Image (cartoon, rainbow, N blue to C red):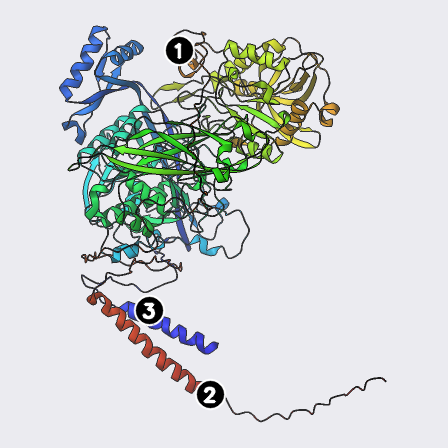
Amino acid sequence: MSRLLVTWRLVLLSWLLVGQVAMTSDRMVQVMPEVPFPFIAPRQCGNVTALERVEIGFKTGVVEHEYIVTFNGYFTTTARKNFIQAALREAEIPSWEIVPRNNPASDYPSDFEVVLLRERARDGRDVLEDHPNVKRVTPQRRVRRTLKRIEYTTELPDENLEPCADKGTPCWAQTWQSSRPLKRTSLAYGAAFWHSTGRHTSRRLLRTVPRQVTHVLQADLLWAMGFAGSGIKVAVFDTGLSENHPHFRNLKDRTNWTNEKTLNDGLGHGTFVAGVIASSKECQGFSPDADLHIFRVFTNNQVSYTSWFLDAFNYAILKKINVLNLSIGGPDFMDHPFVDKVWELTANKVIMVSAIGNDGPLYGTLNNPADQMDVIGVGGIDFEDKIARFSSRGMTTWELPGGYGRVKPDIVTYGSGVRGSGLKSGCRTLSGTSVASPVVAGAVTLLASAVIHRFPMVNPASMKQALMASARRLHGVNMFEQGHGKLDLLKAYQVLNNYKPQASLSPSYIDLTECPYMWPYCTQPIYYGGMPTIINVTILNGMGVTGRIVDKPIWQPYTPQNGDYIEVAFSYSNVLWPWSGYLAVSVTASKKAAKWEGIANGQVTLTVSSPPEEGEKEERTSTVKLPVRVKVVPTPPRSKRVLWDQYHNLRYPPGYFPRDNLRMKNDPLDWNGDHPHTNFKDTYQHLRNAGYYIEILGAPITCFDANQYGTLLIVDSEEEFFPEEISKLKRDIDNGLSVIVIADWYNVSVMKKVKFYDENTRQWWMPDTGGANVPALNDLMYPWNMAFSDQVYEGDFTLGDHDMYYASGSSIAKFPEDGIMITQTLKDQGNEVLKQESQTVDTVPILGLYQMAGEEAGRVALYGDSNCLDNSHLQKDCFWLLDALLQYTSHSHMPPVFEQQGSPFSITNVELPERMEGNHLARYSKVLESSLAGQTRPLPACPHLSWAKGEPLNKSAPTHLYPHQKLLSIDLIEPPVPNVVRRQPSIQHIVSDGVGWDIQPGVPSHPHNSIQSMPVFALAGLTLVVVFFAVHIHKSRSKPKRRKPRLKRPTFINIVKPVV
């Protein structure tokens, strides 16, 4: 064994020596000596080695008096001015002006203008919106971003990171840090360098050494085939780039869209992003030969405006950019000018790659524009293929409350501890989805250059299809965390090289029995009478920027596999634009399955058509099939069915809805959807584990059959209630429905206090309601003689054997005297916010239980704080309390803890909260009329689903729905390799990090030609010679010494005679 080890060590040494002297030519790749890790010499701080991370802070708001006027088309400067002047002159609006925009796009026609309205702004907006050539008028937005560079040693754990003083490099101060931005900000992650995998393991030192991401993703193999981004224009929207940076050899254009007179990067974030994409030295980028276009959209003070982005986007269209990286994001998917411009970009065949956000591990934290269907949204993983803790999770919240979110991110890739270019030279290491995004953008650029001979078929949809079809699924991770899986560069090349224009679906199949990937669908079977399960499928159309679904989707149940036990309904996009659309599939059990249990299978078939391309006569068509598999169970008993009221939850955007916990000063917005599958995820899973079936009500209370449910859950609602809902719910309770209402804080004085002021924009942000809309809840509970107060309380207490924390909750102000009330001693948080005085209050009523009068009447439970159920800011969960409340409401069983600590309690002289005057809730409400204060809209009709008539298939359903449906005409097992000889780019080979390569068949490590194969034969021959001599030398030196023979002791054998 020792001889073999010595021999192999000599072989490895010979290879390293050969690598050091290998010559390069136009057709040979330069080889560097292999070392254990590709580690650039780090900066020194004293005698300690230092690494870097970047922390990001921000301030944001609406710019006072400035408005973006978007037109219906592109017009000259004179025409735009005439339109605005005509509208404002007719209304006699004084003191207005057009804000000048001095940037490279000002010489071209534009589709927007920035107008300053100092007086009568509301009237000015109205008359501008009435102009026939004006599409929309929205406030100008400004974001201030701050970067703080921190250097820390590899010897320190994350929680003890110490700054490393380096007088030679400036550091940046941080003013206000938040993990969840109000608006778009950089998505470089600064809270941690590496993240725990959730399990204890030894030998963690290697995790502190960053790896070269291009090598891990095997970009070397595509470089060796002659592809390095040549011919592709890639744009980086960030903080700029120095002209003479040594890492970039193909810097084509630098433009400045800020109000500063510089093109250089003063912070380093933009340089790092550009390096990951296109660096040609040291920390190698994916596409060093690409045409690099730098768009400086942030100042050195990290300030940017929506209008700067809009101008820069227009310029990118004019320059015919192919790939655009956007390592910024925010929760505002209703920033209409920005969203509309992103659609226009992709419609012009710009492949946009964007970071999904750094707001994980919370669900419902996707950032815009990465959450758009036409954008490639990228999440982050570490080099152990674990989802990075910071990476945002799905689902999208655009569709709430009536629908269901889409799958995002699209794919994930390395975003933790990735190396990229430093500000002036050298390399640095950063983490965040803003790092994962340029990894994919660089890979996309490289892939586009590899199929440039087929470039007409490369578009935002086809590229996204290739990335998703080739992605490697991560084990044990659901689709709202990983999308379609981890980026696989080589497989994506194989897909693109054989791609034919077609439509595809995301997800490509529906299997509600597959856990954990299909979470949360797989956690609850369907049954007759339940709310339909909605699966929101994205349609990607690689045939053209616009398309449509021909006729209707067809439902085809598999007769042998019980397909007739389920019913399916569809809603879908009338027009697929740009490159995409949606297909909402609603699934429920048929009446014949009311007492049946089993697995039902079917498939949805739809045909997508697009107009013919240039030179074609007939329209393009593509037929796709969506396999469906669901588990059906008999209808559960009423006591086990819980209905969650989603309809009355509101969130940011569009209004300022504050957080439920007033202690979260740096996290002011409630923007996660308040859905059981987003920030109430753990509550949902706990109830499912307890045996309850959770259904989602996305329509008014008038739209469900109360006889089917044991309990209606109303948690943290911000919406008003229709009068018809109040009357109907009173009747439902009288007929046996029980209700649990869980509120949050509401106090007008506190709401005014928690407004925040942006000193840069001089704009106040005022909440539109409190943590919950307590006045609306009190209107709902008025017939029950119950109400919450406007007092705000906080504190720790014990209930039974459970430690509890009341975080910014309301107290109960009105309750029937014969009900059971539980009181606690808490701090008056409202007084602390208003007067900065701490005051303790005894006997604060926080929990009430009441059996309504009547033989068949239901029960009502009130609790004043939802924070203990909300993952957004969960400190001590109260899942046990929810269990106990459901035991009371659904099963009419009084838990002992309530009997022991509860008692009748009389509440006197407590004022009920009133709505804040001048609030803007009506602008965003589904219930209130926006033009009439306090007036409700007409009650909308309940949603009606038209169930598709099935076309039965008398054959067996496929057994395995994953691996997912392959794109048509694509075989990833033995793909043909283009028989093309290309010029070899002068790329420095990156040293190995010890990770084995899984090289796909058909992808050579070098182009096939005799000149390039000569070093291989030479190395092989030299290896054989070295092995031959090594073995003989080793034998001659290792002959065993003669030893004296040792006498063996005689062996005596005892023979035992059998006993007769």
Q: Nearer the viewer, mark 1 or mark 3?
A: 1
- Residue at 33% from the left image edge and 77% from the top image edge: 1024
Q: Earlier in the sequence, mark 1 or mark 3?
A: 3
Q: Residue 647 appears at what percent x and percent y?
A: 48, 20
Q: Quadrant of the C terminus?
A: bottom right
Q: Residue 467 appears at what percent x and percent y?
A: 33, 44
Query: 38 or 411: nearer the eye?
Result: 411
- Rendered image: mark on residue 317: none
Would you identify the image quadrant in which residue 885 lies?
Answer: top right
* Three-letter code, disc 1: Ser
Classed neighbour count for the residue bearing mark 1: other residues with Cα under 10 Å, few (<14), some (14–19), many (≥20) = some
The residue that mark 3 highlights is 16
| Secondary structure found at label 1 | loop
- Residue at 43% from the left image edge and 42% from the top image edge: 482
Q: Separation of disc 1 and disc 2 at Cα?
A: 97 Å
* Three-letter code, disc 2: Lys
Q: Separation of disc 2 and disc 3 at Cα?
A: 29 Å
The residue that mark 2 highlights is 1039
Q: Is residue 1003 left or right of residue 200?
A: left
Say whether residue 864 is visible. Answer: no
- Rendered image: mark on residue 930: 1
Classed neighbour count for the residue bearing mark 2: other residues with Cα under 10 Å, few (<14), some (14–19), many (≥20) = few
Classed neighbour count for the residue bearing mark 3: other residues with Cα under 10 Å, few (<14), some (14–19), many (≥20) = some
Q: Earlier in the sequence, mark 2 or mark 3?
A: 3
Would you identify the image quadrant in which residue 624 lies?
Answer: top left
